[in-house]
Image (tube, helix red, strand yellow):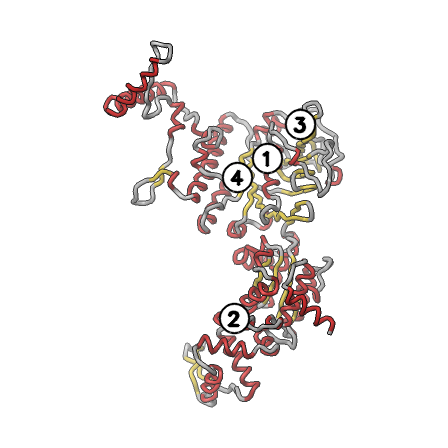
């Protein structure tokens, strides 16, 4: 392509008071709704747009700020050559606008939007800067090149914006759409045009002549000459277009699914129609590239794609991302799809989020990560739990039981589902797997809380990983963000110690449709003690079944709890959520286990979440005691 738009700076545009963002050949914008993704796309579009009507509503203002007419929008772009110097085509185009920085060619273009007192409206103006100023000096910098930013320069970097509301049926009726631009001149030789139009005339005449209905309608319409003052006028009915230039008005796309009859694209679902619009854009860019090559002109298409996954099922989302990667040009893509995010390079991800009254961005700091750490983030976070990229808060836990019961208790405590507050509750599958999630959360400014098992080795490992990742970050102390279960317990053992044995026993009995299921289980296990029994394992060397002596002792109250825990460990996914619901049947505030309630109280304190009145009263009583 020859060039790359390397950096974009925005000052006072819509939701951005001040933003600096580096761009790659493909950049992916992630973030919640209304975070500022579309505004960032639009700002980049303005950088290469010659004329556009500007409203004062595009100017960023703080709460209670009165807009001053002197306030300006500034959008700067830094353009680099792919090599140290621009190639001949780009060098000839940019000419004296080129400056050197560290012995490398650069172009810095500025778009200024300011109020014109004479016209009483805002003007859009493009200028070339003599250097790329420091970020802090953007608003005061005014050293511009005397050479104008010509139309040829802007046309060499055309912007193709595809918004989320795309529909090929709408595009086909719009002469200014990419479809309309592509088919308005189908590029036939004059000789061919003459022959085809003669054939079209013959077809029209034959259709009218051989159709009694059309002939009757034509005769009736020609009576208009009785009221129009002309003897030479007549009315024609054209079942098909007579002129090549009008063919696009009657064009139709038909979709054939294997052996079925073909149907108009207008009768297809929104997914197919949205994808067809995307493919039309691809065709248009490829065609323009051929034209520019024939004319030996530089060409760097800038593709701004908004939610390309809209209306597409998961497999289609995977396909469309690979198609986007093949498009010629530099791409800036906004998405809500964790599937698309999982396919992207970590270096291409730009996370957009609200930061007070303004929007801001951050990235995963891959330059600080080893290759194995990058692999783990890709495999363990993005590919399986890519929705964390859109979260406001993460609650991490170790096992399956916590993963199932925490959302139940969360809804009870906060009177909202976790997702309603932007919270993701995630089982990382073992205490050694917290690190990738914490790394992503740190770099993307996502709040993190952990409910961890309390074994000594677990506490040591989790505290070390947490301290290393969040070192130097304010309000990230282990005792404020991590809740270790007491008495060196895992979650199931903690529930027993915290007084929920009855709920666990009742749940197991209900699932197995019997009473005293654990007692029966103990009796069976005890009857097998001392017997030589075949296990489910096999020897890896001789492939013979392994025999062992049963030595488990489940006698007494302690043995009962041991049997209970052993049974749960084999059936976690079946029992976990049901146990949580059974515990919630308690009428008091202790229907949420103490340590979980304490964790939620800490989250509410830091995140300013509203909690149920029932638990607010309970917490106050605990503090007073």
| Residues marked 1 and 2 touching at CB (< 8 Å) | no
Q: Secondary structure at mark 1?
A: helix
| Residues marked 1 and 4 touching at CB (< 8 Å) | no
Q: Position of residue 444 (x, y in %)?
A: 64, 53
* Mark 1 neighbour density, 10 Å: few (under 14) some (14–19) many (20 or more): some
Q: Of the residues tagged 3 and 4, which is closer to the observer?
A: 3
- Quarter of the picture containing the C terminus is bottom right
Residue 414 in view of the camera: yes
Q: Earlier in the sequence, mark 1 or mark 2?
A: 1
Residue located beneath label 1 in the image? 45
Q: Of the residues tagged 2 and 3, which is closer to the observer?
A: 3
- In space, the residues marked 2 and 3 are separated at their CA atoms by 63 Å
Instruction: Decide which of 288, 305 is in the foreground and name it.
Output: 305
- Quarter of the picture containing the N terminus is top right
Q: Earlier in the sequence, mark 3 or mark 4?
A: 3
Residue located beneath label 2 in the image? 576
Q: Of the residues tagged 1 and 2, which is closer to the observer?
A: 2
Q: Earlier in the sequence, mark 2 or mark 4?
A: 4
Q: Looking at the rendered structure, which numbered label has been put on residue 121?
A: 3
Q: Position of residue 359 (x, y in %)?
A: 66, 45
| Residues marked 2 and 4 touching at CB (< 8 Å) | no
- In space, the residues marked 3 and 4 are separated at their CA atoms by 27 Å
């Amino acid at each position: 392509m020859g060039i790359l738009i390397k950096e974009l700076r925005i000052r006072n545009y819509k939701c951005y008071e001040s933003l600096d963002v580096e761009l790659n050949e493909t950049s992916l914008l992630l973030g919640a709704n209304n975070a500022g993704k579309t505004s960032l796309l639009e700002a980049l579009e303005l950088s290469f747009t010659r004329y556009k009507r500007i409203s004062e509503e595009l100017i960023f203002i703080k709460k209670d700020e009165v807009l001053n007419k002197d306030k300006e929008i500034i959008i700067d772009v830094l353009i680099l050559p792919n090599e140290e110097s621009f190639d001949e085509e780009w060098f000839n185009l940019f000419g004296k606008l080129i400056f050197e920085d560290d012995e490398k060619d650069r172009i810095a273009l500025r778009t200024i939007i300011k109020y014109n007192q004479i016209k009483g409206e805002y003007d859009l103006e493009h200028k070339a800067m003599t250097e790329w100023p420091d970020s802090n000096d953007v608003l005061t910098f005014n050293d511009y090149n005397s050479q104008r930013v010509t139309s040829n320069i802007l046309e060499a970097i055309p912007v193709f914006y595809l918004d989320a509301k795309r529909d090929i049926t709408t595009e086909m009726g719009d002469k200014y759409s990419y479809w309309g631009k592509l088919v308005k001149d189908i590029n036939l030789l004059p000789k061919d045009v003459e022959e085809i139009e003669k054939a079209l005339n013959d077809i029209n005449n034959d259709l009218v002549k051989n159709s009694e209905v059309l002939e009757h309608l034509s005769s009736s319409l020609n009576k208009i000459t009785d009221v129009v003052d002309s003897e030479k006028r007549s009315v024609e009915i054209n079942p098909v277009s007579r002129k090549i230039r009008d063919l696009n008005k009657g064009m139709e796309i038909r979709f054939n699914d294997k052996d079925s009859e073909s149907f108009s694209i207008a009768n297809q679902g929104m997914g197919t129609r949205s994808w067809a619009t995307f493919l039309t854009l691809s065709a248009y860019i490829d065609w323009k590239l051929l034209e520019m090559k024939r004319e030996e002109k530089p060409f760097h298409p800038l593709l701004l794609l908004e939610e390309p996954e809209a209306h597409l099922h998961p497999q289609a989302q995977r396909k469309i991302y690979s198609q986007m990667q093949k498009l010629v040009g530099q791409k800036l893509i906004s998405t809500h799809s964790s599937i698309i995010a999982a396919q992207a390079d970590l270096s291409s991800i730009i996370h957009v989020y609200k930061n007070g009254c303004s929007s801001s961005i951050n990235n995963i700091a891959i330059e600080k990560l080893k290759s194995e750490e990058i692999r783990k983030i890709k495999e363990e976070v993005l590919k399986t739990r890519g929705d964390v990229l859109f979260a406001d808060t993460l609650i991490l836990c170790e096992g399956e039981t916590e993963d199932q019961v925490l959302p139940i208790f969360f809804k009870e405590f906060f009177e909202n589902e976790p997702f309603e507050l932007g919270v993701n509750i995630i089982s990382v599958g073992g205490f050694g797997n917290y690190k990738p999630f914490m790394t992503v959360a740190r770099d993307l400014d996502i709040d993190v809380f952990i409910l961890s098992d309390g074994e000594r080795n677990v506490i040591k490992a989790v505290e070390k990983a947490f301290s290393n990742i969040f070192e130097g970050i304010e309000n990230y102390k282990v005792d404020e963000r991590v809740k270790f279960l007491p008495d060196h317990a895992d979650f199931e053992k903690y529930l027993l110690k915290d007084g929920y044995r009855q709920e666990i026993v009742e749940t197991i009995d209900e699932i197995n449709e019997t009473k005293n299921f654990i007692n029966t289980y103990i009796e069976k296990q005890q009857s097998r003690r001392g017997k030589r029994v075949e296990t489910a394992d096999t020897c890896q060397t001789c492939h013979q079944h392994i025999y062992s002596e049963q030595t488990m002792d489940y006698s007494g109250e302690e043995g009962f709890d041991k049997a209970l825990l052993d049974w749960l460990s084999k059936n976690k996914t079946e029992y976990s959520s049901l146990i949580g619901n059974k515990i919630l049947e308690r009428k008091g505030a202790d229907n949420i286990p103490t340590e979980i309630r304490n964790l939620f109280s800490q989250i509410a304190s830091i995140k300013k979440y509203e909690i149920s009145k029932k638990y607010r009263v309970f917490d106050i009583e605990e503090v007073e005691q």
